[in-house]
Amino acid sequence: MNVIWARSVAILISLVVVAVGVYFLAGGIPALLVMTTALVCLVAFHLFQINRLWKVLDAPAYGEIPSALGLWGEVYYRLHRLVKRWRLQVLQVEQQHTRFIQAIQLRPTAC
């Protein structure tokens, strides 16, 4: 099981444990209300993070990668690492291209 699934299952199990605790302390309706509120907040958080990710991916140029908690922090960290690696590769290719052009320019011309 990968990290995303493991963390998601852990969060859901935690919510169920809290709801069961509320059930035994206050009854069924408050437990259902706690679980529903927690799930709505969780969905809202994920939608907010998806919107932030969409803006980052839709940007015309590389900018600052946002930070976040939990799973989204891992997603943004990996995205940042990927973009950084791609930038280094592009710089290497540009340097090779520049050296190639310089070598062509220094070559004596045939008459």
Image (cartoon, rainbow, N blue to C red):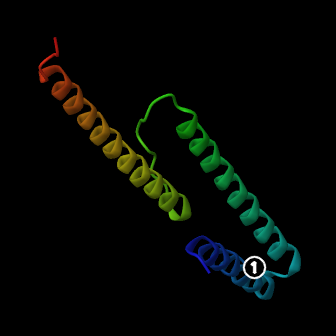
Q: Quadrant of the C terminus?
A: top left
Q: Residues within 10 Å of mark 1 (few under 14, many from 20)?
A: many
Q: Position of residue 98 (x, y in %)?
A: 23, 29
Instruction: Give amino acid for label 1.
Output: Ala
Point out residue 44 in the picture as x, y percentages from the top left corner: 70, 52
* Residue 14 occupies quadrant: bottom right
Task: Give the residue at x 68% y 61%.
Answer: 42
The percent position of residue 60, horizontal first and vertical second, equals: 50, 28
4, above or below 69, in the image: below
Left or right of residue 83: residue 39: right
Relative side of 5 to 61, left or right: right
Mark 1: which secondary structure?
A: helix
Look at the image and tell me in which quarter the N terminus lies.
bottom right
Give the residue drawn at x 65%, y 72%: 8
Q: Is residue 38 above or below residue 14?
A: above
Residue 49 lies, in percent from the top left, at 60, 49
